[in-house]
Amino acid sequence: MIREINSNYLQQCVEIAFLRNSQPENNCAYCPKEKSSIHGDFSFLMGNPDNLMLGYFDGDTLVGIFGFFISPENNWVDCVGPFFKDEWNQEAAKEMFDYSFSKFTQAVRFNFYFNTKNENLHKLAELLSAERNDNEYILLLKKADYKPQDIKHTVVMYEDRFRSEFIRIFNDTFPVAYILPESVIDAIGKDREVFCALDEKGAFVGYGVLKFYDNPNHATAEIFGVDENARGKGYGWAVLNATLEYALNKHNTDTVDLIVDKLNTHASELYYSCGFKLMVENAAYCIKNRANYTYRH
């Protein structure tokens, strides 16, 4: 039986997710691996009426969970799990997704993101007729492995005078993104910093976004973009290195991670040359056409 569950089940949900998510064959990349971080994410999810946590029950016993975060900016839903206390239950997973699909009538996209070794989620995504995107690499850079590069262009911190060009280049580079450029700007000085590449005339031509977490020892080199007319001139290379230099030496972060498409071998080679190493390969699926999906009411 499926129920919408609240914070009364928080600790049980955390224990189930913590048990399963550290295992590659059960991993969901939208869920943290540390118990404290899972607790924080699930507490936020259950405390927000726009989100949804579903429980699958055997009698009165909670045996499976499936979480759904919806972004109010673009109505994308990130699917967290499902996780089961014991063996995987494909039928229960499908039923819980169908339930969420009927609840999120405003959603324009459902996203799945998980370790490629998770065969059960591969099969579920195929059962749901989800569209498969390119696999993504998560790369990690440790401070001890960082190989500083020469920065041959001017890179400065974000200023309000760059706003319109930042938004334009961001939208040109990522016409479909999980976060809006205005939200990135609003987060500057909170959990993000933005680094801006300037050409010889001082015009804004590219950017890099660095994201921070409650754990001060880790950060993410989140998003990079360069104006189409300025590509191939080293601006992206400059802003990447300025971002890493800030994170590792000024912010004193121990590690920085980033995500790159598996097929983007040119970018991967640049990241490897800075000292990044491959940590995980993830698969990405999405359902973005509600009209093509048939669910059970």
Image (cartoon, rainbow, N blue to C red):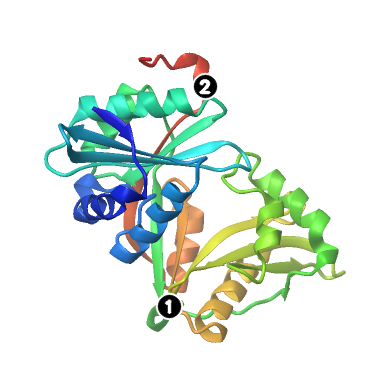
Alpha carbon distance from label 2 to label 1: 39 Å
Q: Is residue 34 visible?
A: no
Query: Image height check: is 77 above or below 188?
Result: above
User: Label 2 sits on what residue type?
Assistant: Asn
Closest to the observer: 26 or 190? Answer: 190
Tell whether 17 sits left or right of 257.
left
Residue 289 got which mark?
Answer: 2
Tell whether 97 sits left or right of 203.
left
Which residue extends farthest left?
86
Q: Which mark is residue 217?
A: 1
Q: What residue is at 67 percent from the left and 67 percent from the top?
A: 188
Q: Nearer the viewer, residue 139 or 14?
A: 14
SS class, disc 2: loop
Q: Amino acid at mark 1?
A: Asn
Q: Of marks 2 and 1, which one's residue comes earlier in the chain? A: 1
Q: Position of residue 232 (x, y in %)?
A: 66, 57
The answer to which of 66 and 145 lies nearer the viewer is: 66
* Location of residue 223 by image quarter: bottom right
Q: Quadrant of the C terminus?
A: top left
Tell whether 221 sits left or right of 278. right
Q: Are marks 2 and 1 in contact (CB under 8 Å)?
A: no
Please give the name of the residue rendered at 66% of the width and 48% of the height, measured from the top-left corner.
180
